[in-house]
Image: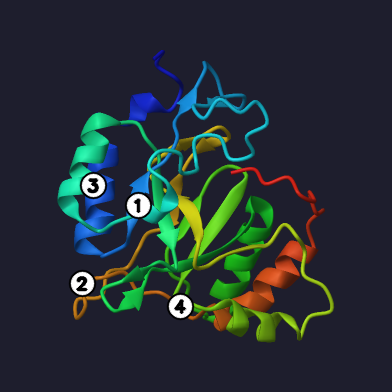
Amino acid sequence: MREILGRRRMTLSSMRNAALTCASRWQWPVLPGTTCVGGRLPTLACSCGAADCVVPGAHPADPVLLAATTDPRMVSWWWSEQPYASLILATGAPVDGGHAPCALSLPAVAGARALAEFDACGVRVGPVAATPTRWTLLVAPYGFEELGELLNAHGAVPSSLRFHSDGGYVALPPGLTGHGQVRWQREPSVEAEHGTPWLPRMETLVDVLVEASAAIPDPGSTLAY
């Protein structure tokens, strides 16, 4: 495979180390995703082979999403075999009597506006993963029934604001998508008591995220990472 822009910043072990941190230290169920192929950003293709792939280099392929695990042996083997595979978090998946983090994602411009408002109001946010086109805020696990009750308070919710709960997934740093590198806009803050990153409740963020997304032109069904 040809070297592509962005991989120069990643060593053969960087993806594996990031995956092991998520799985073994934070107990986040992960699995390898697709990779980007081609020559230059922002037109990199996805290794899945689909010409119309909307999340190139940022979705599960083989194994499927249900294979996500916190087992360090499996995670180590996966990335030893596929060192440039993207790092995929299975959102809301059951793990150790609880559930994995969930997420909310929105266009990058809207995400920047939302974080500025949270900072101005003193609202604490958790980890935020970012690409040049979209930002993803990780939150404590939530269910779709709980989400539905909150969204009923809004007249309309932009389709550009996406909700990633049980059965969903998001790409984590330091992977490379067809639209750019995944990086931490806000680094995970690990709690000493539990040894895992602190996560906010979804309901403390959703109102601002809806408003910020509504202020940005809605791309409709197009989902670019």
**Residue 22 appears in view:** yes
The relative height of residue 9 versus residue 120 in the rendered view (above or below) is above
Residue identifier under label 3: 75
Question: What residue is rendered at 47% in x and 68% in y?
Answer: 102
What colouring method underlies this structural image?
rainbow
State which mark lies toward you, 1 or 4.
Answer: 1
Q: Which mark is residue 195?
A: 2
> Looking at the image, is mark 3 or mark 1 earlier in the sequence?
1
Q: Which mark is residue 200?
A: 4
Residue identifier under label 1: 67
Q: Amino acid at mark 1?
A: Ala
Verify CB contact (< 8 Å) between mark 3 and mark 1. no
Give me the C-alpha separation between circle 1 and circle 2.
24 Å
- What x and y, as percent, mark residue 41? 57, 25
Callout 4: SS: loop
Give the left or right position of residue 220, taking residue 187 as reference. Answer: right
Q: Quadrant of residue 210?
A: bottom right
Q: How many marks?
A: 4
Callout 1: SS: helix
